[in-house]
Image (tube, rainbow, N blue to C red):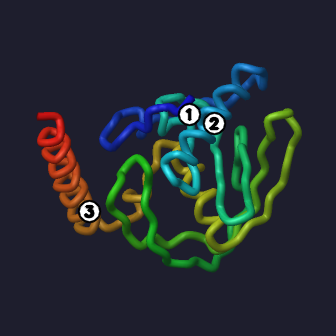
Amino acid sequence: MALKIRLYPDAVLRRHAQPVTQINDELRKFADALVETMILAKGYGLAAPQVGVLKRIIALDVESDFYVLINPEILWASEERVVLGEGCLSIPGVEAEVARPRQIRVRALDLDGQEILLEKDELVARVLQHEMDHLNGVLFIDYLSQAKRLTLLKEYERLKKAHSKSKAKISL
């Protein structure tokens, strides 16, 4: 069952997610819905707050890496940074260049409650960082200068208006 992705400026996107304290069938069912939603939206990743659930759980599907991570935390990040274009399912239609560490080491739990350690670089590291930011109420636009952020958000609002007008025309 696909979930509704919350769009900026929904206040839930700025809230801190709470740690998962119990891994059970209900959480696994939610994880399945999170993964389905991410795949249908054609995203590389999706965090629970993006669907209105303030729990520390993310899904990731990048290249050959597929994970559902519970309570993920970055243990280490390289000093070397890479600047790449980044977008977000909660701010669709816009993207901006963001500098992030090239490589990270992450500890998390899987859906069986087993601890896993991941050391990832490049695109997988970027997506992990982006999704983990969502758990702390941080969006990729927060890494931009104020001028760049305002320009990007104006473009986002323009796209939203154009989309709602085209939907209105279709429904007539």
- Measuring 76% from the left and 21% from the top, which residue is drawn there? 25
* Residue 103, picture quadrant: bottom right
The amino acid type, in three-letter code, at marker 3 is Leu
Q: Nearer the viewer, residue 47 or 104?
A: 47
- From the image, tell me which residue sits under label 2: 56
Give the mark nearer the N terminus: 3 vs 1. 1
Expressed as whole percent of the image width and height from the top left, the position of residue 159 reads 21, 55
Q: Quadrant of the C terminus?
A: top left
Between discs 2 and 1, the one toward the N terminus: 1
Mark in the foreground, 3 or 1: 3
| In this rendering, position of residue 108 left or right of residue 82 | right
Considering depth in this image, is 37 or 156 the residue closer to the camera?
Answer: 37
- Numbered circle sitting on residue 154: none
Query: Badge 3: how crowded within 10 Å, few (<14), some, or many (20+)?
Result: some
Label pair 2/1, CB-CB below 8 angstroms = yes
Name the residue that disc number 1 marks. 17
Amino acid type at circle 2 is Arg
Q: Secondary structure at mark 1?
A: loop
Residue sitting at x 37%, y 65%: 95
Inspect this view and state whether residue 75 appears.
Answer: no
Residue behind mark 3: 152
Please name the amino acid that badge 1 sits on. Ala
Q: Position of residue 29 (x, y in %)?
A: 69, 26
Reply above or below: 97 against 152.
below
| 86 or 79, nearer to the observer | 86
Mark 3 residue element:
helix
| Quadrant position of the N terminus in the picture | top right
Marks 2 and 3, how far apart in space? 28 Å
| Point 12% across, 42% down: residue | 169
Q: Is residue 9 left or right of residue 122?
A: left
Between residues 11 and 29, which one lies in front from this camera angle?
A: 29
